[in-house]
Image: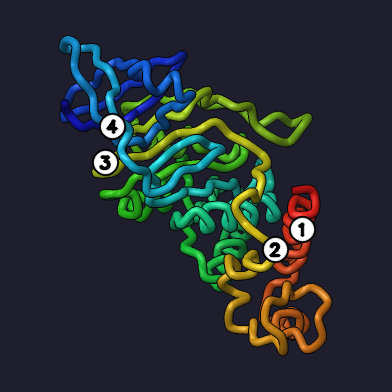
Amino acid sequence: METGIVLKGIGGYYYVRVGDTVYECRLRGKFRKLQQTALVGDEVKITSLNREQGVIEEILPRRNALIRPPIANVDQALLVFAAANPDPNRLLIDRLLVQVSAEGIHPLLVINKGDLDPEGAQRLTALYRAAGFTTLITSAVTGQGLPELKQHLATRVSVICGPSGAGKSSLINALAPGLSLKTGEVSDKIGRGRHTTRHVELLTVGEGWLADTPGFSSLSLHNVNSKELAHFYPDFLPYMQCRFPGRMHRAEPDCGVRLAVEQGLIDQTRYHNYLELLEEVLEQERRY
């Protein structure tokens, strides 16, 4: 048997790269009986049937896995938002930062289309850098930030995600022109783009792997509980010396986080987004 990595899966077929060869594979019957499937990014053992086809015999243990987009063994998540057209959704940014951090994946916030609103891109970048996140400004049109982004991609498995219309496919094409991914326009009527990526696929970009994924606009915080949510806000951590342990920094007396918001030490929108996500998590806990 040989060990490879799953590049994509379509209609029950998995395309597995072993060295310089890509095999079209099916899962061994035992997986179908157990209703198990492979994910893009999975390391697998295969038996080759010929030079083009094989059978997946074993799925090796995963370091991590995301549900939406479905991908395994990710080192880094590129969260791509446009500086303008469409305007960045701050709540969705904070939601994705929490989600990937909770999965143990390093988030890299990419403010794309920096040429459309340079000042807005700088403000947003400064805010999230101050909050403790790695943030870059990029432009597929001008090439801004692309060399730095390539450095962050090298030797890593990265997933690229974010809302439709943020320019994810254009950004990948700028990083690796030979891929020629399909891109879409942003609708003037609804203010967002059309999905142009139909499935998750692991692409070779320079010295790293990058997964192109379908766009999305929401993500459940299924893997976070109400007591730990604040710990995924690095800008909250210096001020979490509350009188009693286990606080949620919502209405408790003498709360260091709330005081920091009042003093302008924590961004007010970040805190309001935290309260909205907290209520969502609490509702999930009440329901289940």
- Could you give the CA–CA distance between mark 1 and mark 4, rounded to whole angstroms? 38 Å
Q: Secondary structure at mark 3?
A: loop
Res 230 quadrant in image: bottom right
* Disc 4 and disc 3 in contact, CB within 8 angstroms: no
| Sequence order check, earlier mark of 1 and 4 | 4
Q: Residue 278: horizontal and vertical position, in percent?
A: 74, 61
Q: Residue 228: horizontal and vertical position, in percent?
A: 62, 67
Q: Is residue 29 visible?
A: yes
- Could you give the CA–CA distance between mark 4 and mark 2, rounded to whole angstroms? 36 Å
Task: Please state which of residues 223 and 173 is positioned toward the viewer in this rendering.
Answer: 223
Which residue lies under the disc numbered 1?
Answer: 282
Name the residue type under label 3.
Gly
Say left or right for 71 vs 128.
Answer: left
Q: Residue 132: horizontal and vertical position, in percent?
A: 52, 70
Q: Residues within 10 Å of mark 2 (few under 14, many from 20)?
A: some
Which residue lies under the disc numbered 4?
Answer: 44
| Sequence order check, earlier mark of 4 and 3 | 4
| Sequence order check, earlier mark of 2 and 1 | 2
Which circle marks residue 226 in the picture?
2
Q: Secondary structure at mark 1?
A: helix
- The structure residue drawn at horizontal position 64% and vertical position 64%, both measured from the top left corner, is 229
Q: Residues within 10 Å of mark 1 (few under 14, many from 20)?
A: some
* Disc 1 and disc 4 in contact, CB within 8 angstroms: no
Name the residue type under label 1.
Leu
| Sequence order check, earlier mark of 1 and 3 | 3
| Sequence order check, earlier mark of 2 and 3 | 3
- The structure residue drawn at horizontal position 64% and vertical position 48%, both measured from the top left corner, is 222
- Could you give the CA–CA distance between mark 2 and mark 1, rounded to whole angstroms? 6 Å
Task: Please state which of residues 248 and 128 is positioned toward the viewer in this rendering.
Answer: 248
Which circle marks residue 206 in the picture?
3
- Could you give the CA–CA distance between mark 4 and mark 3, rounded to whole angstroms? 23 Å
